[in-house]
Image: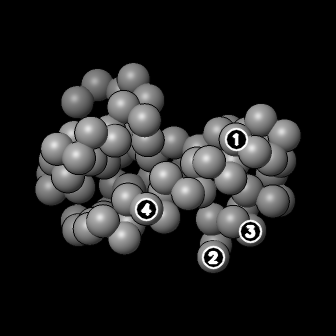
Amino acid sequence: MWLAELIRAHPGQPIEADLAGVRFMDSTGIRVFINAQAKAANVQGGSLYIINAHGLVRDLLQITGVYNVLCGNQPT
């Protein structure tokens, strides 16, 4: 998984996943980001956040209640 490799390559650092070009996500995508965020936190206190989630992707994250967890305090 490319996210796992990125997290291992940058231990303890904040990582931003830019979803500006992503138009679709389902529960599998949410699970990937939740698991990656947990892994980042376990690797020397790093973090992973989604940025630029728009349209249906943002709606999905908000409806499922994970927007604030995965995106932090970004404006909606």
Mark 3 or 1, nearer chain start? 3
Question: Which is more foreground, mark 4 or mark 3?
Answer: 4
Q: Quick one: SS at disc 2?
A: loop
**Residue that numbered label 2 is attached to:** 1
Foreground disc of the pair 4, 2: 4
Q: What amino acid is labelled 1 in the image? A: Ala
Q: In the rendered structure, find residue 5 and report the number of the disc placed on it.
A: 3
5 lies above or below 40: below
Q: Secondary structure at mark 4?
A: helix
Q: Which residue is mark 4?
A: 31
Residue at 26% across / 68% down in the picture? 26
Cα–Cα gap, marks 4 and 3 = 17 Å
Q: Is residue 33 left or right of residue 45?
A: left
Kind of residue indicated by mark 4? Arg
The crowd level at tag 3 (other Cα within 10 Å; few <14, some 14-19, many 20+) is: few
Of marks 2 and 1, which one's residue comes earlier in the chain?
A: 2
For residue 41, the mark is 1
- Image quadrant in which you'd find residue 7: bottom right
Query: How many numbered discs?
Result: 4
Answer yes or no: do the residues labelled 2 and 3 have beta carbons within 8 Å? yes
